[in-house]
Amino acid sequence: MTNYTPKPEHKFTFGLWTVGNRGRDPFGDVVRPGKTPVELVHLLAEVGAWGVNFHDNDLVPIDATPAERDRIVRDFKAALAETGLCVPMATTNLFFDPAFKDGAFTANDPRVRAYALQKTMNAIDLGAELGAKVYVFWGGREGTETDAAKNPMESIKRSREAMNFLCEYALDKKYDLKFALEAKPNEPRGDIYNSTTGHMLAFIQTLDHPEMVGVNPEVAHEHMAGLNFVHGVAQALDAGKLFHIDLNDQAFGRYDQDFRFGAVNMKSAFFLVKLLEDNGYGGSRHFDAHAYRTEDYEGVKEFARGCMRTYLILKEKAARWNADQEIQAILAEINADDGSMSRYFGKYSSEKATTLKDESFDRPALGARGLNYERLDQLTVELLLGVR
């Protein structure tokens, strides 16, 4: 059996907020004691992670003094050096503090918008100091419960102005950073702006520096909207905009569950891993998930190991799928091409269009052909179940 031990080349990462999650939910208080960022770095090193990511206030409390900030960062750097972990990504918490109850970049109060920019610049400085190459923006409070409260056109404008400002800030500071925008349809706001990866991809094209901005899709967020996450990630890959990815799991249509990767939708997880591996995705595999509230910290370690192990198992399954002779024979039959239609594809020409309009097609035969998709899907299921 393959050794499913994580290695640095797998680029598995967790956030401080993931393994540090204490199990609080809207109906119950914490179930696990708090751990310091240094302790969490050592926990991640123990389970075999490659990197650790953070919100600014996961590491440095929002009310820390400059001296406290420097001490915390110094201790964190020492833990990174001791364990060999790196910091591939950082982000800003613009959703927890009451100041952001009406949003950050889209808040109606201009003082809140200005504070959000200030806080983000300081957090970008911190991320760059610790070596982050990707900076994620999740607008968890950028939305409404009632559209009477905000003009959506003005909110789009404010979002654009904020991203343009922060792109210029990173360029002015000569930071080697790319920005990744993370979509979510709802929760904690009733409706969040730019609610899907597709919305974000369209928004990016309106920015002053679209070349430095991509997306950070999350499994749970797209599943909350009932969407096919694999298709959204494929769109981002095709656009050259998959700068980061959040892996977890989620039952469709539920609240944000943040389950262990592969815990709910195994076939979807399989095709996601296959998509990433087949297309040479070179970024982090970041697990933005939480252990069950039932767990102590030994359970948290099992959760983290499980995320990575499931990914590696599915990576091996994808290689088997690609090498399975019967599966590949069906795919070859489905995609059979004798070359007779090739003259009609590719770049348009008037001559090509005229010739195509004169082509004769056997429409009944086109509709009568069976495609054997049932067999193909069953073979996929059997491969995942370990019987082929």
Image (cartoon, rainbow, N blue to C red):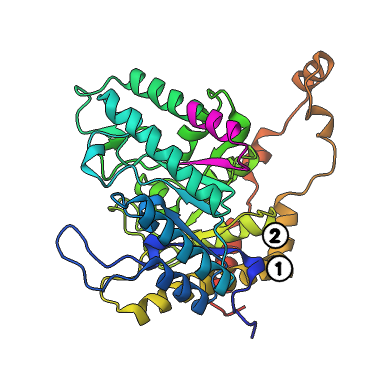
The residue at the point 43 percent across, 69 percent down is 38
Q: Residues within 10 Å of mark 2 (few under 14, many from 20)?
A: some
Quadrant showing the N terminus:
bottom right
The residue at the point 27 percent across, 47 percent down is 96
| Quadrant in the picture for residue 190 | top left
Does the segment drawn in magenta span residue 180?
yes
Q: Residue 118 carries which label?
A: none
In the rendered structure, which amino acid carries the disc numbered 1?
A: Glu
SS type, badge 2: helix
In the rendered structure, which amino acid carries the disc numbered 2?
A: Ile
Residue 259: horizontal and vertical position, in percent? 37, 64
Per the model, the C-alpha gap separating discs 1 and 2 is 6 Å
The residue at the point 66 percent across, 33 percent down is 363
Q: Give the range drawn in magenta.
A: 165-182
SS type, badge 1: helix
Residue 304: horizontal and vertical position, in percent? 45, 72
Question: Could you tell me if the residues under marks 1 and 2 are in contact, i.e. CB atoms within 8 Å?
Answer: yes
